[in-house]
């Protein structure tokens, strides 16, 4: 059974230890529990976060290009959004379930992350921030939960200097190249063809 608290899943917590470290300079607009980010937000006032409000409002409080990274782990479906709102007695409007809400959040994230900064997105797809916002895919983590549970997909993307860039200028795989997770490729043997 998948955990409701994504950051407690072992491969995720190991990734966050490696990439986020102590969390300084990181923000998490949908923190819930266990977020390593320095600046955290959750609608539920019972959550151990530094802010309690709408994610978009939280993101707008940061100056442009001020953060090293953002953890983007929103509810993955309209059903999960409704459950979050019901849990704290808030009325869910159609706004929070529309793609335009998530686009606005990602636009704010793009604005507040420094060039060279990182965004780690969690969900049931690998959409992430995307090339159109100037982000290059660096890593993908797939967490299969088994049975009839959806897998969790984690994308790690790095912000380039601007949305207009050349793939040849980036280290790492191009967006259309497969990213293979797992064991490293063996080194070619010396003296063989």
Image (cartoon, grey):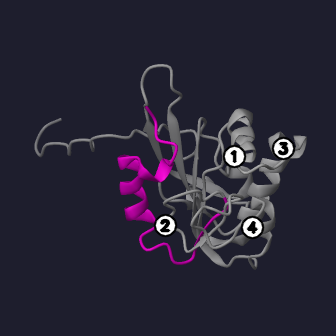
Marks 3 and 1 close (CB-CB < 8 Å): no
Q: Which residue is mark 4?
A: 59
Give the residue drawn at x 84%, y 40%.
98
Quarter in which the N terminus is drawn: top left
- Mark closer to the chain start, 4 or 1: 4
Judge the density around disc 1: few (<14), some (14-19), many (≥20) Cα neighbours within 10 Å: few
| For discs 4 and 1, the disc positioned in front in the rendered view | 1
Residue 92 numbered tag: 3
Which residues, given as a range, are shown in magenta?
A: 1-29
Farthest residue, direction right: 94
Q: Which residue is mark 1?
A: 87
Give the residue drawn at x 42%, y 24%.
146
- Please give left or right for residue 40 compared with residue 22 in the image: right
- Please give left or right for residue 90 compared with residue 155 in the image: right
Marks 4 and 3 close (CB-CB < 8 Å): no
Give the residue drawn at x 74%, y 76%.
62
Q: Secondary structure at mark 1?
A: helix
CA–CA distance between discs 4 and 2?
Answer: 17 Å
Residue 36 numbered tag: 2
């Amino acid at each position: 059974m998948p955990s409701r608290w994504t950051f407690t899943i072992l491969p995720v917590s190991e990734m966050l230890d490696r990439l986020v470290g102590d969390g300084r300079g990181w923000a998490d607009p949908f923190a819930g529990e266990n977020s390593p980010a320095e600046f955290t937000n959750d609608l539920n006032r019972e959550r151990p976060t530094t802010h309690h409000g709408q994610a978009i409002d939280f993101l707008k409080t940061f100056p442009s290009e001020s953060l090293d990274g953002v953890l983007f782990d929103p509810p993955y479906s309209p059903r999960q959004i409704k459950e979050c709102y019901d849990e704290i007695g808030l009325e869910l409007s159609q706004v929070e379930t529309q793609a335009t809400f998530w686009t606005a959040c990602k636009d704010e994230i793009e604005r507040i992350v420094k060039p060279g900064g990182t965004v780690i997105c969690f969900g049931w797809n690998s959409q992430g921030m995307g090339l159109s916002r100037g982000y290059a895919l660096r890593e993908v983590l797939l967490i299969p939960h088994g049975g009839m549970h959806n897998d969790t997909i984690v994308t790690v993307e790095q912000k380039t200097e601007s949305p207009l860039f050349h793939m040849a200028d980036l280290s790492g795989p191009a967006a259309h190249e497969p990213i293979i997770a797992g064991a490293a490729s063996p080194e070619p043997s010396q003296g063989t063809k």
